[in-house]
Amino acid sequence: MEWDEPSPAVAASRLGHSIKRAEQALIREKTRALRDVGLSVPQYTVLLTLAGSPGLSGAQLARRCMVTPQSMASLLLTLEAKELIVRERSDVHAKVFQCRLTPAGRTLLDRADAVALAVEQRLTAVFTPAESEEFRSLLERTVAILDDETGRSAPAVLPASAGLPASAVSSAPASTAHWSQVVGQ
């Protein structure tokens, strides 16, 4: 039996469809904005994560940035070639490399973060503070519900001003205490 794609009206009535469209619009705008500073959204996400948690391994970064280990390996090679990160052998595990931002990486991240934040500010500007907080709360609740139902552990609830992994928020400078990764990329 052949599967027919749902009609636009049916697709538009689905919550998952709306969430995906919002995610795609956000990533599209961040991609456009970050292109001006020479980074992709995944590269920016890695730099932002390392700013808050220096010394992570490629495997740890892959989990936190929600990409495959193979994708992370490629991202790290590119960032290292651009001299934005350094990878140093771990003192504890000879086969593990820990990643850190270089001064050039920190400088570029600051520029990239400003343009990414501008995209997010355009979005939040159309909401009242109460609406913005409610929207964030509903999204976090959605993640928690779905993670609980699948048996996955839900990520830590982020502060209202944050959007990056909780581990990165604790030590990240104020200018980097947000993200979108969202979504992932």
Image (cartoon, rainbow, N blue to C red):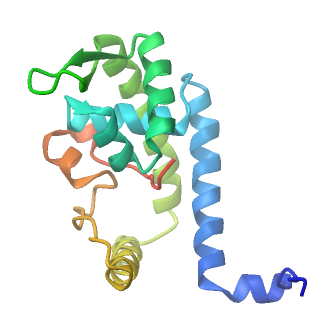
Residue 82 in sight from this viewpoint: no
* Residue located at (52% from left, 39% from top): 41
Left or right: where 43 falls relative to 34: left
Left or right: where 142 falls relative to 42: left
* Residue located at (14% from left, 47% from top): 170
Left or right: where 81 falls relative to 15: left
| Figure quadrant of the N terminus | bottom right
Instruction: Tell me which corner region of the image, top left, top right, bottom left or bottom right, holds residue 130.
Output: bottom left
Residue 42: x percent and y percent? 50, 38
Q: Residue lying at the far left in this picture: please name it.
A: 92
Residue 127: x percent and y percent? 47, 70
Using the image, determine if residue 135 lies above or below residue 23. below
Instruction: Tell me which corner region of the image, top left, top right, bottom left or bottom right, holds residue 161.
Output: bottom left
Residue 169: x percent and y percent? 20, 48
Residue 124 in sight from this viewpoint: yes
* Residue located at (50% from left, 20% from top): 78
Instruction: Tell me which corner region of the image, top left, top right, bottom left or bottom right, holds residue 105.
Output: top left
Residue 82: x percent and y percent? 47, 12
How many marks do you count on the picture?
Answer: 0
Left or right: where 64 falls relative to 77: left
Of the pair 171 and 148, the residue shown nearer to us = 148
* Residue located at (60% from left, 65% from top): 22
